[in-house]
Image (cartoon, rainbow, N blue to C red):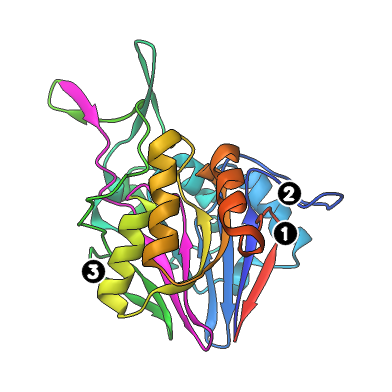
């Protein structure tokens, strides 16, 4: 059995002790170990929510980072201060500096420390190919083929010589779980694009996911672009349970719920999902 617990999300379960923030983190547990997928934005919120879930950093066997943005990596120092030397899985491009442009100013939004400093605290395991972290728990590797809509933000940039260019999101990855129900896809932000990620999973793992959880970065999609995503999900994919969260955006969540009804569910902090 694999259990996926949402530790951090923009929202928290109503009347619960969990704190919400703009970010995401999931605790993944199986009979073979425990993995933390992303760390949210704030160390204090990560540690608080783990305590409310009765989860201890000492039980973590590995960390996986979906990409470098600080709403997914900001809580990392809280874990590393307690558990130095943990294996950390990510794409090799995760060390590239990332910035958010606000008017004529640029704000750093990448890893909380340079990659060489991070490498002194963890066992860095960087790969652009799929990697099995625990038995039946895989990274997707880099999603290279991106003919469909990507999860882009116009203000998200990287340095390019003397200037700037749009973030290529080369470091974006998701997780795939092999379960008796079928493949489960867990996304951090899906900057590579939801449809591109789904196609990548089918190519590399030979099957379509039956469940999709996490950030889908449809927050900026609207009109025909959003409708296209829905139409492809309906026509090209088997019925899937969807737990879209974080950067999905309220408009896209409502559109997905209208299109797919009871297949669509929220996934606030405190949500626990189990798969045989």
Q: Which residue is drawn at the image coordinates 63% and 43% (left, top)?
A: 10
Q: Distance between the residues labelled 2 and 1?
A: 7 Å
Instruction: Count every numbered label the image shows and give the total.
Output: 3
Q: Which residue is drawn at the image coordinates 29% and 45% (left, top)?
A: 169
What is the quadrant of residue 272 in the picture? bottom right
Q: Which residue is drawn at the image coordinates 74% and 60% (left, top)?
A: 51
What is the quadrant of residue 251 in the picture? top right
Q: Which of 57 and 198 is in front in this view?
A: 198
Q: Which of 178 and 163 is in front in this view?
A: 178
Circle 2 is placed at which residue position?
A: 12
Q: Which mark is residue 270?
A: 1
Callout 2: SS: loop
Q: Are marks 2 and 1 in contact (CB under 8 Å)?
A: yes
Image-based side of 125 in relation to 144, left or right: right
Circle 3 is placed at which residue position?
A: 129
Q: Check if residue 147 falls in the magenta segment.
A: no
Question: Is residue 143 depicted above or below 227 in this figure?
Answer: below
């Amino acid at each position: 059995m694999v259990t996926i617990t949402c530790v951090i999300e923009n929202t928290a379960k109503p009347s619960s002790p969990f704190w919400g923030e703009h970010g995401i983190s999931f605790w993944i547990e199986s009979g073979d170990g425990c993995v933390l997928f992303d760390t949210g934005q704030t160390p204090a919120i990560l540690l608080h929510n783990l305590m409310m879930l009765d989860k201890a950093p000492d039980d973590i066997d590995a960390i996986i980072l979906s990409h470098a943005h600080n709403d997914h990596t900001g809580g990392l120092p809280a874990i590393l201060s307690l558990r130095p030397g943990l294996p950390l899985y990510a794409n090799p491009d995760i060390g590239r500096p990332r910035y958010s442009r606000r008017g004529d100013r640029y704000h750093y939004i990448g890893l909380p420390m340079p990659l060489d400093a991070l490498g002194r605290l963890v066992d860095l395991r960087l790969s652009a190919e799929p990697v099995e972290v625990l038995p039946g728990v895989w990274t997707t590797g880099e999603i290279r083929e991106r003919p469909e809509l990507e999860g882009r933000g116009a203000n998200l940039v990287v340095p390019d010589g003397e200037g700037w260019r749009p973030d290529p999101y080369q470091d974006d990855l998701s997780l795939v779980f092999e379960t008796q129900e079928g493949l489960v896809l867990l996304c951090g932000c899906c900057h590579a694009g939801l449809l591109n990620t789904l196609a990548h999973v089918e190519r590399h793992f030979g099957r379509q996911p039956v469940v999709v959880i996490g950030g889908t970065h449809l927050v900026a999609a609207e009109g025909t672009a959003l409708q296209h995503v829905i139409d492809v999900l309906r026509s090209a994919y088997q019925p899937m349970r969807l737990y879209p969260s974080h950067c999905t955006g309220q408009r896209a969540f409502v559109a997905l719920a209208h299109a797919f009804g009871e297949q669509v569910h929220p996934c606030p902090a405190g949500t626990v999902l189990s798969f045989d």
